[in-house]
Image (cartoon, rainbow, N blue to C red):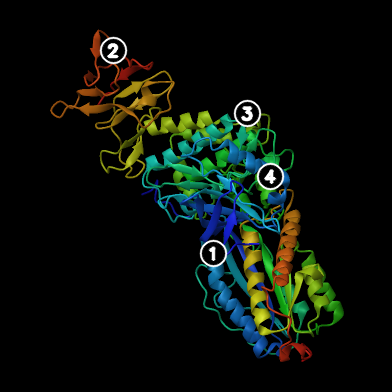
Amino acid sequence: MRMTGNGPAARRTMVLIFVVDTSGSMEGEKIGAVNYAIESVLPELKKISEGNEEAEIKVAVLEFSSDARWQDSPPPPFSVEQFYRWTYLKTGGVTNFGMAYRELAKKLSSHNDGFMTASGGSIAPVIILLSDGQSTDASSKYAAALEELRQNDWFKFAIRIALAIGEAAAKNVLADFTGTEEAVMSAYNKEALIKMLRFMSVRPSQIRSVNQGWDPGSALGTAANQMKQVIDEMHDAQNRGELGTDVRDPWAIWEGGQY
Amino acid sequence: MKLNVEQEVETLAGYTVRVLGDIGEGGQGVVYRAGWRLGSATRESALKWYPSENPTAQNSDFFHNLQRNVASGPPDANAFLWPLDITKKMDDGSYGYVMKLAPANYAELKKILRGRVPFASLSAIINTARNMAKSFALLHGRGYSYQDMNAGNFFIDPQSGDVLICDNDNVAPYGTNCGIGGAPGYMAPEVVTRVKSPDIHTDRFSMAVVLFRAVFIDHPLRGRRVSDPNLTPEERDDSNLCGRNPIFIFDPADGSNRPIPGTHVNALKLWPLYPKFVRDAFLEAFSRDVMTGARMEHRKTEEEWIDLFLQLRDITVPCEACGAETFIDPDEPQNRCVECGRAISKLPELRFRNRRVPLCPGAKLYKHQIDAGSDDCTTAVGEVFRHKQYPDRWAIKNQSGFSWTCGERTILDGGMLPLIAGSSVAFGDGGKAEILMTPGA
């Protein structure tokens, strides 16, 4: 029936971007836990997206080591409603943050093959950066790439959070990315890593896609409010013990990232 | 803190509420299915719970306003899921309130907008819109405003179009705002730009958005501009599209925000199918003048919308060919069925001072049609008959309980009023109509 048999309302798209360090030091339990966490969170995101009349959640994964590549099967960003068979990420190489930032900035665009091109409109993304190590790219190149990314409006308006895996992770580098140290969480064991990554995937996506903490004044105000809400909730959950313990797994005290 | 299943909380009225399960999570808190124990009886209810992190709910004005709403009761218990009792605060400050559960046959407007639950008929859509406006008329008539209208506040019976309004925690008297701004896409532009706090006038903007979405599904202000690559992310943000510079997707003077084919499919499909007077009403509601200009405090009232949807109901008739409901717009030279596209033959018409009612065989005449002072559109006062052997003979059976007069003739309750072109009927209870027998009928 034309009058009553309506399809769903047009929605905007919110892309959840995982930027994952897949350098050699991530090998083994760490990348295993990351893969497991992302795989298990996709069905949950699917449920949130399907119930939301305002926005659909899509996911894109950027893995970086000596270079940076988008997971391309299926092509990013993919809808969590259509797809949730997760292709496990593999490791190898060094930790070139600059490459990742340049690649990310390229896709945070409304033009050509950028991710912000959904015809129903794009909501600024949630970006989660995960790493266990130090940056191995030349500091000038790293600084230039970071600066370029920071000039990107979609990045400015994004919810940016990071997960430092193990003690050797460069929390200051991750804080450069998020804009504040408070948005960087640390995982020292697999259980905590999985719990944190799940939390960091679900709550920010929910807050962003259903517009909680929305600031009527501006996109930047919204980003600031929602970042604050995410940070507060992450720390509250951690204080309540919901994000695991800080007991060190053996891998957490290894030197990371210097391959 | 959140509550666990089986947990019991005491209420301010001296009762207890027991958590039975989760219903959902909204912008402001969690909703549980709960048993509200009133002495020996337990009523299955909903418990909306504000965790201590919610700054609005922690505001003491908000709490007192909620208490006032419990004390004053709903404007209409059949139309609102009103706060009935408030729990005592927990140590960390979290608390909640008890309300009725929506019956299982009701679906959230959100679900309808997701395309999960279809309306059963065109009448159900029209009734939904009218009931929404009617409920807000009751609320506003009490001197209240709702302040946070959005697609999450409505439970709808998709068969009948009956509506229940939930989340009445922000409802407050004129001039009072307890901190809520509203939801993006539904807030009035002047609330978005922080020129003022929500009140009845901003409610009326939100109501126009909700009505538009109930009927046309897509959003009235999110068209091409929402994804225009020539606009900056800031310009594509709701703070601009629904705040600083809103443009209706069907604005006749500015085509820069038209729906995109293949994306805003519902709006493009449904807009031309509704009669002109319906489109005109939305064009007015989303005109620049009414949205952000001189008429911001003279937006379309609830009564105007109620009357509009009553008129729309009056002209909704079954198509002779396909049986589906369609419109007979008296202003159109030739009506076509909105479903099958076939031409609809002209029908006789009762022409009242401010409404025109097409008459088709088997149709009922309702109280609001013959009585200008009534908006009762469910009480049938007559039924239309067409002669089987002589199809150009029509009559209305009087079921009103009053006598009608037509010229010299008096039609007692239960009698038949033959329709004679050009004659005038007085319906006893105030209404007066000309009978128009259109050629071909």
Q: CA distance from mark 3 to mark 1?
A: 48 Å
Residue situated furthest left in the rendering: B389
* Residue ID for mark 3: B298
Q: Amino acid at mark 1?
A: Val
Instruction: Give the crowd class for mark 3: few <14, some 14-19, many >=20 residues within 10 Å.
Output: few
Q: Is residue A72 visible?
A: no
Q: Is residue A244 visible?
A: yes
Q: Quadrant of residue A181?
A: bottom right
Chain letter belonging to callout 1 = B
Chain letter belonging to callout 4 = B
Instruction: Give the crowd class for mark 2: few <14, some 14-19, many >=20 residues within 10 Å.
Output: some
Q: Are marks 1 and 4 on the same chain?
A: yes
Question: Does label 3 or label 2 sit earlier along the sequence?
Answer: 3
Q: Are marks 2 and 4 on the same chain?
A: yes
Q: Amino acid at mark 2?
A: Thr
Q: Secondary structure at mark 2?
A: strand
Question: Does label 1 or label 4 sit earlier along the sequence?
Answer: 1
Residue situated furthest top in the rendering: B408
Q: Nearer the viewer, mark 1 or mark 2?
A: 1
Q: Are marks 3 and 1 on the same chain?
A: yes
Q: Position of residue A150 (x, y in %)?
A: 79, 66
Residue B62 in the image: above or below residue A55: above
